[in-house]
């Protein structure tokens, strides 16, 4: 079982930056493909970014390219999501996801077996 705990969310002003963290345990972290998703009330969970086991491969949703950066520190068992130039439309709950069986970065939520509890990001304009 993989346990994921997100942190770093909060209330920020539009235009500011924020870094979300997701700490993993229960599995060899470097064996996990990791992803970040977000979900607004009443909407489907939306892929934001994904990262390969080594961290050398990343993939972003078109809607966040250029503002979001995913990275990981395998020594710290942590994946990060850096968000720059926050906008009001970034307001939602962000979730970390992991899966040890993936062989490439997945963009569908159903492909990830393990999820964190989510962290709320609220952007005020």
Image (cartoon, rainbow, N blue to C red):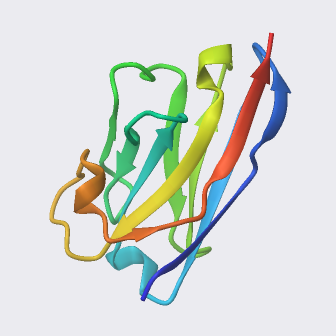
Image-based side of 115 in relation to 125, left or right: left
Image-based side of 18 in relation to 4, left or right: right
Q: Is residue 26 above or below residue 46?
A: below
Give the quarter of the figure containing the N terminus.
Answer: bottom left
Q: Is residue 24 visible?
A: yes
Image-based side of 88 in relation to 66, left or right: right
Q: Is residue 63 above or below residue 17?
A: above
Question: Residue at the spot x=23%, y=60% of the render?
Answer: 111
- x, y percent for residue 123: 76, 23
Residue toward you, 58 or 26: 26
Question: Residue at the spot x=57%, y=45% of the render?
Answer: 94
Q: Is residue 91 above or below residue 33?
A: above
- x, y percent for residue 91: 65, 27
- x, y percent for residue 3: 53, 80
Outermost residue to the front:
42
Total residue callouts: 0
Question: Residue at the spot x=51%, y=58% of the render?
Answer: 72
Question: Residue at the spot x=60%, y=63% of the render?
Answer: 117
Q: Is residue 87 visible?
A: no
């Amino acid at each position: 079982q993989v346990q994921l705990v997100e942190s770093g969310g909060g209330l920020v002003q539009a235009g500011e930056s924020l870094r979300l963290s997701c700490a993993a345990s229960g599995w060899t972290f470097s064996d996990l493909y990791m992803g970040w998703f977000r979900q607004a009330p009443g909407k489907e969970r939306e892929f934001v970014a994904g990262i390969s086991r080594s961290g050398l491969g990343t993939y972003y949703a078109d809607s966040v390219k250029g503002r979001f950066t995913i990275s990981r520190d395998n020594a710290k068992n942590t994946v990060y999501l850096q968000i720059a130039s926050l906008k009001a439309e970034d307001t939602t709950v962000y979730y970390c996801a992991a899966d040890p069986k993936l062989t490439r970065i997945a963009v569908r939520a159903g492909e990830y077996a393990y999820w964190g509890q989510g962290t709320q990001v609220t952007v005020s304009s």
